[in-house]
Image (tube, rainbow, N blue to C red):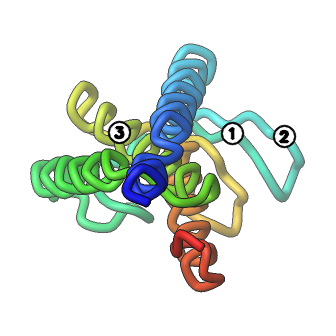
């Protein structure tokens, strides 16, 4: 009985870390490509009137809020990454939760990397009617949504 409990507690850790690594890599590669190929404030139309690549930088929080809060946001990101790593270390009872938390960790590390090494986050996905964002933001949002949905559906239990 104890062996089964250990298996459940430590389950899917490699999926969690693998998902985080993939999310981080996709985020950083996409940002590097935008920085290399699109001038700052440049626009590349993809679906005119609906979606474009717009190279911007955001020193603040989501939607450009708190532009002077960089050091505070670095601290928040470090705490978030630490929490995700603690959760991941314990393991997950279901694959979906491991993937959701891995996405959140990868996204948080992606934006933290920008803040630490560039002083601001590179954003580029522009749906015209929504503030510009990046893949890290997407992974954070989808991961949080997934974790909530799977938890509400009972996916967090080990049964």
69 left or right of 142 in image: left
Give the SS element for disc 2.
strand
Q: Is residue 40 visible?
A: no
Tell me the number on the disc at residue 43: none
Asked if the residue under mark 1 is in contact with the one under mark 2, i.e. CB atoms within 8 Å, the reply is: yes
Specify the farthest residue to the bottom. Answer: 152
Which badge, 3 or 2, comes first in the chain's sequence?
2
Q: Residue at (10%, 49%) from the top-left corner?
A: 71
SS assignment at label 1: strand
Camera-side residue of 53 and 73 = 73
Q: Which mark is residue 46?
A: 2
Please identify the quarter of the rendering in which residue 159 is found.
Answer: bottom right
Q: Position of residue 116 (x, y in %)?
A: 21, 32
Residue drawn 44% across and 65% down? 63
Q: Is residue 107 above or below residue 39?
A: below
The residues tagged by marks 3 and 2 sit, at their Cα atoms, a distance apart of 28 Å
In the rendering, at what x and y percent does residue 158 appear? Answer: 53, 69
Q: Identify the secondary structure beneath mark 3.
A: helix
Give the residue number, with chain letter if any, for mark 3.
109
Q: Which mark is residue 53?
A: 1
**Residue located 17% across and 54% down the image:** 79
């Amino acid at each position: 009985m104890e062996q089964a409990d250990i298996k459940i507690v430590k389950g899917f850790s490699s999926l969690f870390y693998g998902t985080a690594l993939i999310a981080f890599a996709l985020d950083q590669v996409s940002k590097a490509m935008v920085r290399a190929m699109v001038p700052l404030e440049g626009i590349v139309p993809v679906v005119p009137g609906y979606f474009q690549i717009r190279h911007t930088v955001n020193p603040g929080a989501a939607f450009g809020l708190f532009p002077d809060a960089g050091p505070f946001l670095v601290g928040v990101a470090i705490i978030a990454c630490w929490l995700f790593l603690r959760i991941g270390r314990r393991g997950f009872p279901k694959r979906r939760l491991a993937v959701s938390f891995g996405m959140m960790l990868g996204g948080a590390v992606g934006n933290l990397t920008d803040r630490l090494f560039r002083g601001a986050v590179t954003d580029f996905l522009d749906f015209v009617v929504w503030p510009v964002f990046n893949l890290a933001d997407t992974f954070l949002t989808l991961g949080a949504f997934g974790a909530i949905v799977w938890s509400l559906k009972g996916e967090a239990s080990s049964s």
